[in-house]
Amino acid sequence: MTDALPVNPASLDDASAIAAIYGHYVEQGTATFETEPPSVEEMAGRMRKTLDGGYPWLVSRDGAGEVLGYAYASRFHPRDGYRYACEVSIYVRQDSHGKGLGTALLNALLEHCEALGLRQAIAVIAGTEPASVVLHARAGFRPCGTLEKVGRKHGQWIDVFFMQRSLGEGDDTAPPEEP
């Protein structure tokens, strides 16, 4: 199915569909620890900040042009020494799970990050999301830490898993010096 559903760069016009997808996870799930769904304007602002920072935001659409899922990368930490590491995030519309969209989105996102010269990708995954752990493991991420019971949502304490994957040359070589 993913052959018929290409992954492309998102635009700010996608903010409404993205906010709706994410809103479901905020209200119903534990993949995010946000408790109030962001408005379309807030989501557009988040997208703008990511894109203006030079990071990719991607979407997958069905044949009618509806957004079925999205993925984006952002700087892992604001301090300059972390500039070659990014955090990756993926969300798939509830009625589109199990169709390979997460894999397609993650693989495309990693390609974009490598093209940017990033060297490490980090996923921060709620312990209540085993499918996300499997998705990332299949893409070459390895577990690198667990924060126990640091999140609380829907009446439960939730662990957070960190997974990491090298991009491009990883730490085998030094990145090119910046001007």
Image (spheres, rainbow, N blue to C red):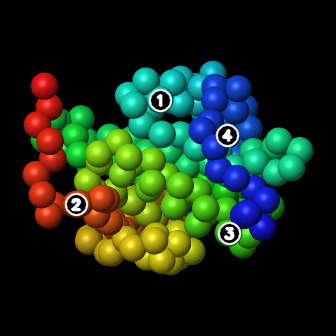
Q: Quarter of the image for the N terminus: give it.
A: bottom right
Amino acid type at circle 1 is: Leu
Q: Is residue 5 above or below residue 51?
A: below
Q: Residues within 10 Å of mark 2 (few under 14, many from 20)?
A: some
Q: Between disc 1 and disc 3, whose residue precedes? A: 1
Residue 100 badge: 3
- SS label for mark 4: helix
Q: CA distance from mark 3 to mark 2?
A: 26 Å
Is disc 1 in contact with disc 3, using a CB cutoff of under 8 Å?
no
Which one is in front in this view, the residue at disc 2 or the one at disc 1?
2
Q: CA distance from mark 2 to mark 4?
A: 31 Å
Which one is in front in this view, the residue at disc 2 or the one at disc 4?
2
Which one is in front in this view, the residue at disc 1 or the one at disc 4?
1
Q: Between disc 2 and disc 1, whose residue precedes? A: 1
Say which residue label 4 marks.
18
- SS label for mark 1: helix
At 62% across and 36% down in the image, what residue appears? 10
Counting from the top left corner in percent of width and height, residue 43 is at 59, 30
Q: CA distance from mark 2 to mark 1?
A: 23 Å
Q: Residues within 10 Å of mark 3 (few under 14, many from 20)?
A: some
- Left or right? Give the position of 166 relative to 38: left
At 67% across and 56% down in the image, what residue appears? 92
Say which residue label 1 marks.
51
- SS label for mark 2: loop
Counting from the top left corner in percent of width and height, residue 82 is at 19, 44
| Closer to the camera in the image, 46 or 62 | 62
| Closer to the camera in the image, 48 or 29 | 48
Residue 170 badge: 2
Q: Quarter of the image for the C terminus: give it.
A: top left
Q: Between disc 3 and disc 2, whose residue precedes? A: 3
